Image: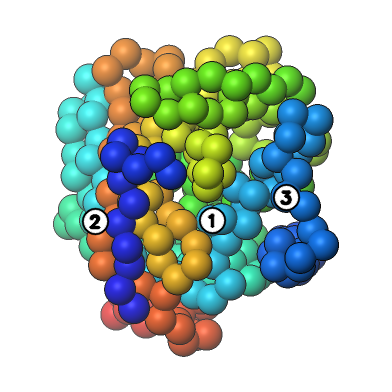
């Protein structure tokens, strides 16, 4: 399926949660439903972000990660991404460089697993950990659940570049999130994140993320370009770019350990 590129610089424009979010989508279609984006209901903006980036079907893409690290040196990786938001499942398989070929991250019902083709073993890992040693986190690739995981502590109107935005300061509502505090710059129509600042429990800035470009696949949006900037190590960052975005149905067996092992034979 073809995707329509949306460049925000030019246009002004888990399971239980999935079903709740689907209900909110249906509510938007009802003539009696008022989209509450007034100043007294900022929580609705989080619902809209989740809804706008949720895929009711499957999503696949090719991802390129360009890492800049003043200590470890620069690195470029290519990854095949498969995502199924209906059960918050995803698979990320490395194709390049040769040193990472066959490595994979598989998020399924019993947790997130990392596969090492050298040992041919799966090891349990955390959704909040670094993805392949980059400034991206494993949680960056799962379905957005902001409305479930955060409360809006404060909200103001502002600008980011040419855009009028909502500036939301968030506090986590549970301990399972990667970042307990976040600050988001969100476009007003549609509600999409342009910038995010991610903080620790002590409110120390850990990472700043930028999402300048989005692609529309089906009725949903996905950031086709992201930049994750490390706030603790100067000049350290990871650029994440997507191409070959598709919403074609993915076979069920792709989201299994057996599939990851098979492609590595």
Q: Position of residue 230 (x, y in %)?
A: 39, 23
Q: Position of residue 145 (x, y in %)?
A: 67, 50
Whole-number angstrom distance, CA of label 2 to CA of label 1: 23 Å
Q: Residue at x 40, y 81 (%)?
A: 248
Name the residue tied to disc 3.
35
Name the residue tied to disc 1.
53
Whole-number angstrom distance, CA of label 3 to CA of label 1: 17 Å
Q: Nearer the viewer, residue 64 or 55?
A: 55
Instruction: Tally the numbered discs.
Output: 3
Determine whether the residue tagged by mark 3 lies in a helix, strand or loop.
Answer: loop
Mark 1 Cα-neighbour bin, 10 Å: few <14, some 14–19, many ≥20: many
Mark 3 Cα-neighbour bin, 10 Å: few <14, some 14–19, many ≥20: few
Q: Residue at x 64, y 26 (%)?
A: 168
Residue 39 vertical position relative to residue 143 in the rendered view, above or below: above
Residue 163 vertical position relative to residue 113 in the rendered view, above or below: above
Mark 2 Cα-neighbour bin, 10 Å: few <14, some 14–19, many ≥20: many
Q: Residue 162, located in which quarter of the rendered image?
A: top left
Name the residue tied to disc 2.
78
Q: Position of residue 181 (x, y in %)?
A: 66, 25
Q: Is residue 161 left or right of residue 67?
A: right
Q: Say which quadrant the N terminus sits in.
A: bottom left
Q: Residue at x 50, y 67 (%)?
A: 219
Q: Earlier in the sequence, mark 2 or mark 1?
A: 1
Q: Earlier in the sequence, mark 3 or mark 1?
A: 3
- Marks 3, 2: nearer the viewer: 3
């Amino acid at each position: 399926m073809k995707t329509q590129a949306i460049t925000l610089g030019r246009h002004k424009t888990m399971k239980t949660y999935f079903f709740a979010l689907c209900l909110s989508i249906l509510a938007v279609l009802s003539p009696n439903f008022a989209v509450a984006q007034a100043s007294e209901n900022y929580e609705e903006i989080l619902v809209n972000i989740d809804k706008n980036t949720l895929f009711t079907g499957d999503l696949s893409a090719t991802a390129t990660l360009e890492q800049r690290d003043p200590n470890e040196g620069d690195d470029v990786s290519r990854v095949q991404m498969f995502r199924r938001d209906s059960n918050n499942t995803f698979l990320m398989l490395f194709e390049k460089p040769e040193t990472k070929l066959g490595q994979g991250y598989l998020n399924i019902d019993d947790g997130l697993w990392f596969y090492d083709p050298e040992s041919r073993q799966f090891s349990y890992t955390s959704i909040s950990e670094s993805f392949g040693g980059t400034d991206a986190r494993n949680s960056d690739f799962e379905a957005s659940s902001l409305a479930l995981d955060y409360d809006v502590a404060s909200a103001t109107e502002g600008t980011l570049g040419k855009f009028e935005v909502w500036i939301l300061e968030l506090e986590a509502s549970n301990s399972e999130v990667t970042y307990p505090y976040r600050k988001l710059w969100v476009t007003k129509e549609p509600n999409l994140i342009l910038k995010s600042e991610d903080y620790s429990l002590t409110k120390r800035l850990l990472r700043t993320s930028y999402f300048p470009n989005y692609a529309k696949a089906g009725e949903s949006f996905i950031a086709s370009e992201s930049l994750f900037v490390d706030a603790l190590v100067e000049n350290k960052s990871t650029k994440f770019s997507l191409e070959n975005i598709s919403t074609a149905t993915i076979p069920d067996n792709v989201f299994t350990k057996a599939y990851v092992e098979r492609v590595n034979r």
